Amino acid sequence: MRPRNALIFATVLLLSSTPVLADTLKIGLNYPQTGRYKDQGLQQRLGAYLAVDEINQAGGVMGQPLELVIRNTRGEPDQGARNTAELIDREDAQMVFGGVSSAVAIASGKAARDRNRIYFGTLTYSNATTGAEGHRYMFREPYNAWMTAKALSQYLNRNHADQKFFYITSDYTWGWSVEESVRKFSNTENTDVHQGVKTPFPRALINDFRAALEQAQESDAKVLMMVLFGDDMVRALNLAYEMGLTEKMQIVVPNLTLGMVRQVGPTIMEGVVGAAPWVWNLPYENNYQRGKDFVEAFSDRYEMRPSSSAASAYSIVYQYKDAVERAGSTNTDAVIRALEGHRYSFLKDEQYWREFDHQNVQTVYVVRIKPRETVVADQFSSDYFEIIDFLPGDEAAQTREEWEQRRKEAGKPTRL
């Protein structure tokens, strides 16, 4: 072989044997970096990045490294929809997830649907997300308001039956869903007896919460149902404490997250009751090894305990990876088929993606905030949650008949 030909041959051989880095598989995270739900948004980001790094260290998704592309929704539905469109159209994200406000998740999910992409709701509790506004491209990882209310009301009916309730509710789709569902299952639908008031969303002022709490104080109710979330809950609960209501009434916050209770602090939060799809101490109490591994990895990396919001984002990234690998493709239709009906155990006991509505069916936990000395004894001063009750997912979730009835009332088809 001539020297020149030998050189060409050697060069070709070298190039053919050199590994070529695969293009990244992009997924988009749509979360509030600012606004009243920013703490829950940050937890999503931390959980998502941890999952992406772990998956990439283990070889990626079918050999492709994952790349997380992020956008700030600011807690605004229109911005969430624009972000989703941009993540898909300009960044070529194959899947988008996120949303702390249900209104944001619903708007974002529709933008993904219009572009033939899956949207995973990461922190969206309104019944409408997988109910009246549900569609084939929306999958909700956490529980919904109906499931929350059934589990919470099981506890309330045993411990606070025949007591008067007062509702302070955030005036948007999530708040409406939760109040309606809790009233239904706790037998407090009579609004003349169990009164309530709506507070503006997303721009409630301190005076709005003060006026609502004054009405609660005048009602002589024994149970104060605070259907508020994020910074709204934090500000209202601080006011309730200043007014002495935490000593006179059982405070119930239907959806509790670690970030919210940390912002308020253990002194004011002690004794507050709520519900959660997951809390960081659950894997230790029930010996869920994969859940313990997640808590340890998150705590070591970020020097804090993970919230349910972080766990949801972390789980979604892994669920998408597993679905793509089962499908053997990132094709949206193939991934949807791989998700529908899939059962798995990951950070807790068994969960599954229900085929007819894409709701994740899972155990719901009722929790009460522990005394201050217990909370601060934890390495990260975060041992807040005492699990006081639970309800299996199939008992908590709407039946197909109940779901179809809601769809009919909304003028929507009874199949996604």
Image (cartoon, grey):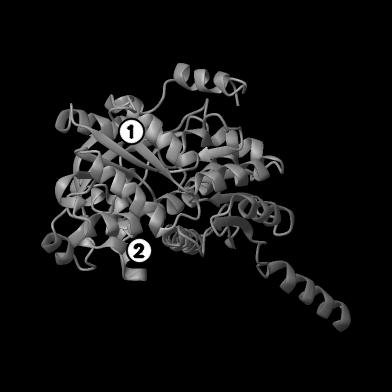
Residue under label 2: 298
Query: Distance from label 1 to label 2 (Cα)?
Result: 30 Å
In the rendered structure, the answer to whether residue 384 lies left or right of residue 342 reads: left
Picture residue at 28% right of the left edge, 59% below the top: 238
Q: Quadrant of the C terminus?
A: top right
Q: Splitting the image into 4 quarters, where does residue 388 fall?
A: top left
Q: Which percent across, then down, holds residue 273?
A: 23, 45
The disc at residue 378 is: none
Q: Quadrant of residue 188?
A: top left
SS at mark 2? helix
Q: Nearer the viewer, residue 22 or 412?
A: 412
Q: Earlier in the sequence, mark 1 or mark 2?
A: 1
Neighbour tally class for label 2: few under 14, some 14-19, many 20 plus, Cα within 10 Å: many
- Say if residue 216 shows up in the picture: yes
Q: Check disc 1: other Cα within 10 Å, few if <14, some if 14-19, many if 20+.
A: many
Give the residue at x 43% y 40%.
175
Residue holding disc 1: 149
The amino acid type of the residue labelled 1 equals Ala
Say which quadrant the N terminus sits in: bottom right
